Amino acid sequence: MAHQADAKKFLDERGYQGALIRGDNPLKLFEKPVRDRIVDSYYWKEQCFGLNAATLLDRAVELNFIGGTYGVAQKPTPFLCLVFKMLQLTPDRDIVLFYLQQEEFKYLRALAAFYIRLAWEKDEEVYTTLEPYLTDMRKLKRRTREGWALTHVDEFIDDLLIKSRVCATTLPKINPRLFLEDEDRLEPRESALGEELEELDNEDEQNEASEGEVEELANGNGRPLSDGSDQESGED
């Protein structure tokens, strides 16, 4: 109960003096109904009590699915509860990047990515920090309101960059990448498949050229010489 009361105290706007994200109480990045469900959930009361940036890592490596809320009662997932705890703790960037860069724990990476998308205020930093992980194609289990779904780390990262709502959370507005490129705030992104795409383009060009030659032959242009074996003989 003390932990629950502490969370509600953190949400009390009267005399709030904690860290600010986007000029406001970080926990308000979650909508009030979701905040209330998190604070009242069993996982929050039992597993998030007394966590700090270091001990939260122990909980995060135990995650085995992502998601927002689920079921008729819209219960919050452990994933969402830990993101909420990170917003309460507002860990240093070096700690968040440490979470993100761990290769062994893919759900820890997803947790850090979601937090970065919520809490980091400069659009260009969000893109440059998250885009390298668009090459991570490991599978992720995702709990939805109706049941379970399969996604991948790169798909989840892409959702964070292009969608307005992920895991029962409305994400802060972010400018499209092309806009940031036009503003010279981002360099054009080079695809990790750049060389393979060039090879495919060259193959397509060669195939198109070959098809053009075939069409010319079919139209009677440049008809190849016949050896006469298919012509009827004029002798009796």
Image (tube, grey):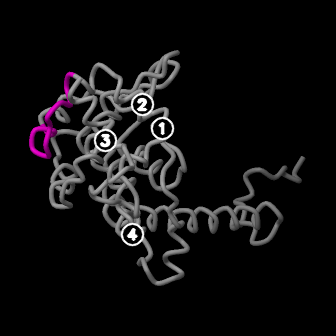
Q: Earlier in the sequence, mark 4 or mark 2?
A: 2
Which residue position holds label 1?
Answer: 32
Q: Earlier in the sequence, mark 2 or mark 3?
A: 2
Q: Nearer the viewer, mark 4 or mark 1?
A: 1
Seen as rendered, the residue at the extreme front is 14
Where 140 sits versus 86, above or below?
above
Give yes or no for contact between labels 3 and 1 (Cβ–Cβ under 8 Å): no
Query: Judging from the image, what secondary structure is the residue with disc 2 in?
Result: helix
Give yes or no for contact between labels 4 and 1 (Cβ–Cβ under 8 Å): no
Residues at marks 4 and 1, CA–CA distance in whole angstroms: 25 Å
- Identify which amino acid the numbered label 3 is placed on: Val
Q: Earlier in the sequence, mark 4 or mark 3?
A: 3
- Identify which amino acid the numbered label 1 is placed on: Lys
Residue at left 82%, top 66%? Answer: 220
Q: Nearer the viewer, mark 4 or mark 2?
A: 2
Q: Which mark is residue 36?
A: 2
Residues at marks 3 and 1, CA–CA distance in whole angstroms: 15 Å
Residues at marks 2 and 3, CA–CA distance in whole angstroms: 14 Å
Which residue position holds label 3?
Answer: 83
Give yes or no for contact between labels 2 and 1 (Cβ–Cβ under 8 Å): yes
Q: Earlier in the sequence, mark 3 or mark 1?
A: 1
